[in-house]
Image (cartoon, rainbow, N blue to C red):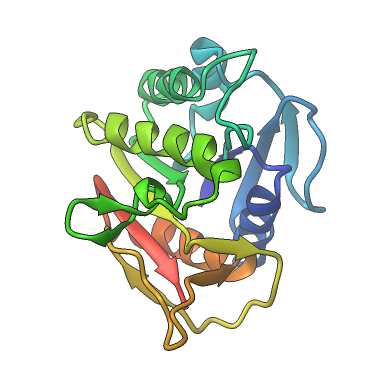
């Protein structure tokens, strides 16, 4: 597949690039810096809030993958995160590419029916802004009915680790292991992410990944 990857230089984006390349896919990595996240990708410097520019870049690709992330406090002086994602959707629409797969957040996952993780009293304040920004994007995507999108939430804790290939796929509920922990390595998350690009098993849905 030919994949256009936004936010390719971040922790998750760089691992998605490596995973896709390892399976023989072609990856064009887009970032503000134009840096090469891993050897073998085609790197492009661009502002993805420019929908017209994104349309030009996405044209001819099989899928657009977005690993964009808001600042930790959820703010962005250059462009609010929701507006940025709305521009991405507009750009993908204009390109003629139907498939959009998005790196999401865990804060909107439910710990009980109607109760989101980010709304719990013990949810860390340092992450709340980021979680709410991601949640706004999910709510927006659920109004988009003309693209084949998938929003992929990680476990509550995600960080560099091992590619174990041993994880669970879920939906809107927070998944925890036998010790009550909700974890996933960035490497296994990237594996599940590229699986979804290939299989298109959760069209216009949120899926989640955890051990």
> How far across and how far down the image is residue 93, in percent?
35, 23
Choose between 89 and 40: the one closer to the eye: 89
Q: How many marks?
A: 0
> How far across and how far down the image is residue 83, in percent?
45, 17
> How far across and how far down the image is residue 121, in percent?
40, 51
Above or below, comparing residue 8 to residue 207 in the picture: above
Quadrant of residue 21 within the rendered picture = bottom right
Above or below, comparing residue 184 to residue 211 in the picture: above
Q: Is residue 178 left or right of residue 140?
A: right
User: Quick one: which residue is furthest to the bottom in this view?
Assistant: 178
Choose between 32 and 209: the one closer to the eye: 209
Above or below, comparing residue 26 to residue 146 in the picture: below
Which residue is pictured at 59% across the width and 62% down the height? 158
Which residue is pictured at 69% across the width and 59% down the height? 18
Q: Is residue 3 visible?
A: no
Which residue is pictured at 75% across the width and 36% down the height? 43
Above or below, comparing residue 63 to residue 186 in the picture: above
Q: Is residue 76 visible?
A: yes
Quadrant of residue 172 within the rendered picture = bottom left
Choose between 179 and 169: the one closer to the eye: 179
């Amino acid at each position: 597949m030919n994949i256009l990857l936004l936010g390719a230089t971040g922790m998750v984006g760089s691992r998605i690039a490596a995973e896709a390349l390892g399976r023989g896919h072609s990856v064009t990595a887009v970032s503000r810096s134009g840096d090469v996240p891993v050897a073998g990708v085609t790197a492009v410097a661009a502002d993805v809030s420019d929908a017209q520019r994104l349309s030009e870049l996405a044209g001819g690709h099989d899928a657009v993958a977005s690993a964009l992330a808001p600042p930790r406090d959820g703010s962005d002086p250059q462009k609010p995160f929701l507006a940025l994602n709305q521009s991405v959707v507009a750009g993908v629409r204009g390109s003629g590419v139907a498939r959009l797969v998005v790196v999401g957040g865990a804060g909107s996952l439910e710990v009980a029916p109607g109760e989101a993780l980010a709304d719990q009293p013990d949810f860390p304040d340092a992450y709340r802004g980021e979680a709410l920004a991601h949640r706004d994007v999910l709510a927006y995507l659920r109004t988009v009915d003309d693209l084949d999108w998938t929003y992929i939430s990680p476990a509550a804790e995600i960080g560099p680790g091992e590619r174990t290939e041993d994880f669970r796929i879920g939906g809107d509920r927070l998944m925890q292991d036998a010790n009550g922990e909700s974890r996933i390595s960035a490497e296994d998350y990237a594996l599940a992410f590229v699986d979804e690009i290939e299989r298109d098993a959760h069209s216009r849905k949120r899926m989640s990944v955890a051990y």
